[in-house]
Each structure stands twice: as structure tokens, then as C-alpha cells.
Image (tube, grey):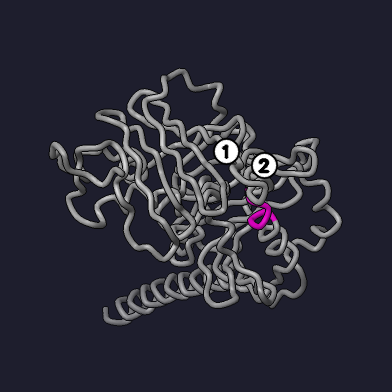
Amino acid sequence: MSQPIDKQRTHHILIVGGLALAALVAALSVSLLDARRVWQPELEGAVFAAWPDQAPRAQDIEVAHGEARFSISRQGERWVMPSRDNYPVRPDIVAAIDAVLSGLTYAGARTADPAKYPALALAEPGEAGGGARLTVRDASGAVIADLIAGETRGQTLYIRLPGEARSFAADLADGTSAAALTQTADQWLDLGFLELGRTAIARVRIQPETGPAYRLERPARSTRNFALREPAGWTPITAGAGNGPASALGRIRFRDVRQVERLTGAIVGSHTAETFGGLEVTLDIIAQGETRWARIRTNALTDDAAEAAALLQEESEGWAYLLSDLALDRLLRPLDEIADPRPGAGDAP
């Protein structure tokens, strides 16, 4: 009776062993296939080899990273942002993008596993661990460059070509940076062009939204504090109380821009700064709902200031610039926040 039982056991063991062997072979096959999918010989050469020849054809550039989505377009000899009424963008950022695409070279293949993309900031823009996508099209709408840029380590940028699983390490050309790929829309715009320099400002006239207008001035660049000259009967709270509003145009950065003709609100205040060199700059403050926008006017009080006034007027004419709360506070600070009304007192001559 034992012999048939032993044969049955042997048969059972062979079946189980065969199944185990088949499972092992299948697992090895999957591993090998996965290894082949993940591994790829080292790559060499430019990521966008044709870019130098195609760059002159570039017409539109789309940028997407985080929640940001915007585009810029070529308009004659300059690039503009359509969503900002075709306001010119910074040429240095366009040049930086060109340098990245021109000099990017493969350093080697990396993961093709989507689960590992976030570790290299190569997931889809807007997702956790998402990268920055840059798409360049020509006038016909054909794509001539498209990539998702991820983390940068030294001069190595991790990239992925949209629609492909493979990711790569790529080297940036010497002296170039990938920072331009992650600039926000307002960073593409030169919204910090108005910078008179604090020491250059001689006097200001301010009409706040509420309260009386007032004038602050100082006799020389070396004088630290601005004196309150008008109106009479007011005394500064401290010697330097007027320095904040008086130096507001020493350096100011706007938050956004649009064509001034699109604004429908009224002028609610103004800030005029005059430099020792004779340049006069006025910001008319326009209320648009809860926001405040500045329209810029310039005037040359001396011949030496004529060129600076003309250049500033040419750059800003026809545009209105959005003010931050901090900038607005300095530009139109009410008189009673820097001075006390004291009958018979004040610095007025």
C-alpha cells in the first residue's frame, strides 16, 4: 500500500515544484523586462539639436508650473504677454530660455516610473512634485521644443519630454541657469523699472485719498530727514516721520499691469516726486474696485533731466500699474499719520 502513496507524493511534489519553477521563470522574465524598460544606454549630444536653426521661427512660448499658466508671443522685434494687453516681457528672460534650450545636453537616462517622478520634480505641472513645462511653437502652431524641467542639482537639470515615460539628467551649458523656466508671470514683466533712488529725491507732494495734501522736502542729498513744508500748523510726529512717504519712489515694484484705457475708476490721489537733477515723476492713483493702480506722468524741470523723462514716459505711457498695499500706504500716507495738527506750529517758512 505504501508504494502507491509514495508515487502520489512524488507526483504532488513534482507538480508543486513545476509550478514554483514556472512562477520563478515568470518573475525573472518580468524583472528582465522591467530592467530593460528602466535601463537605457548612456546618451550623448544635445537635447534639442535642431534648436539653433529653429529658434528664429519661435512665435509663442507657453509656460506652466504650479498653478501658473501663461504664454508670451513674438511681436515684431520684441516679445509680449497677451494676457497683460501685450505688455513687453523682459528680454533677458527670453535670452535665458534660449540659452537653456541651446546648451542642454544629455548626461544619462533616469527613471521611467511615474511613481518616482515627484522625487525629481518631474510630475505634471500642478501636481505634487510637479515640474515646469515649457512649450515653444512656430507661427503655424507646430511644436519646435517641449520639455518638463524638474529639479536642478548644480549644473544638472532633470528633464522629461512630454508624452514619454523616460526621464533624463541633462547638463546645462556653463554660465547658464534653469531659473528662467520657473519664473512667474509678473517676473517675466519688468515691473521694477521705476527707481529714482532715495538720495536723489529732493521734494514730494502728496494728495492722500483722505485728508489734506502736504509737501515734504530736504535741501541736500546728505540731509537725512525730510521736513514738512506744507500745510502750516502741522508738526511731524518724529524727525523722520516723513521719510517713508517721501522716499516711496526711491524704489518701487508694481504687482501687475494693464492698459490704462481699460480702467474705469476715478483718480483718488497723487504722489509727485522731484529729484535734485530736475526729473519730476507723478503717479496718479486710480481706484478700480478694491484695487489701486498708478498712471505715470513725467516732466523735465531742467535740460539735464529731459532724456530720463522722455525714456520713462515712453516706457510707461498708456499703461497702469497695480500697487501693493505696502506701496500704496507709502505713496498716499495720510498727513495725520506722520504729523500732529498744532495751531501755529509746523516747519512751513
Q: Which residues are magenta?
A: 89-94
Residue 141 x/y as whole percent = 75, 37
Residue 211 lies within the magenta run: no
Q: For the residue carrying disc 1, how many other residues have a C-alpha within 10 Å: few (<14), some (14-19), or many (20+)?
A: many
238 vs 112: above or below = above
| Magenta stretch holds residue 90 | yes
- Amino acid type at image mark 2: Ala
Residue at 51% in and 51% down:
275
**Pointer 1: what residue?**
298
Secondary element at image label 1: strand
Q: Nearer the viewer, residue 34 or 306?
A: 306
Q: Quadrant of residue 250?
A: bottom left
Q: Nearer the viewer, residue 214 or 244?
A: 214
Amino acid at circle 1 = Thr
Q: Nearer the viewer, residue 77 or 119?
A: 77
**Which residue is denoted by mark 2 in the rendering?**
310
In the image: residue 65, left or right of residue 248: right
SS for callout 2: helix
Q: In the displayed structure, would residue 250 be above or below residue 153?
A: above
Residue 288: percent from the left, percent from the top? 40, 24
